[in-house]
Image: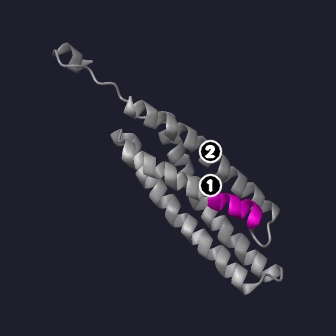
Amino acid sequence: MAAARRGTASSTALSSVPLQMLFCLSGAYCALYFLAMLLVATYKSQVFSYPQSHLVLDLALLFLLGALEAARLYLGTKGNLTEAEAPLAASLGLTAACALLSVYFLLWQTLVLRADSILSATLLTLHSLEAVLQVVAIAAFIS
């Protein structure tokens, strides 16, 4: 408003507040998800006859998911707040990769408990909502 009064063109903020709120919520949930899945993996290895090679694979994919989530949230927040398409598009690609890993933990693990299903379905829902809002934000930044 003050810029419009001085005679310069007014700029409209294009950053998406709902997307930024989802990034914050997703960051907190991903940290809790990571810890809960570590506990569930420990439980599975102690209570069930869980093959060691499958346990190593599940833990490696869980740590990969954690690293991808950190990069995804960093790039998404940076792209949204600076209104830049490239970091937000990279975050969208990482969101697809994280969603694929969430589907692995939801359906394709060696042993899927109800806790796995609930935690992974919630994470997949967050990824879906974020993907939709990222596409809308990228479209707003481009136009």
**Amino acid type, residue under disc 1 in the picture:** Ala
Q: Residues within 10 Å of mark 1 (few under 14, many from 20)?
A: many
Range of residues picked out in magenta = 99-108
Residue in the image at 51% along x and 55% along y: 94
SS at mark 2?
A: helix
Residue in the image at 44% along x and 37% along y: 138
Quadrant of the rendered image containing residue 1: top left
Mark yes or no: residue 16 visible.
no
Look at the image and say whether residue 80 sits in the magenta stretch.
no
- Residue in the foreground of this view, choosing between 81 and 54: 54
**Amino acid type, residue under disc 2 in the picture:** Ser
| Residue 61 image position (x, y, % from top left) | 61, 71
Residue in the image at 55% along x and 54% along y: 28
SS at mark 1?
A: helix
| Residue 68 image position (x, y, % from top left) | 51, 62
Q: Which residue is mark 2?
A: 128
Question: In the image, which disc is placed on residue 140?
Answer: none
Asked if 4 appears above or below 75 in the picture, the reply is above
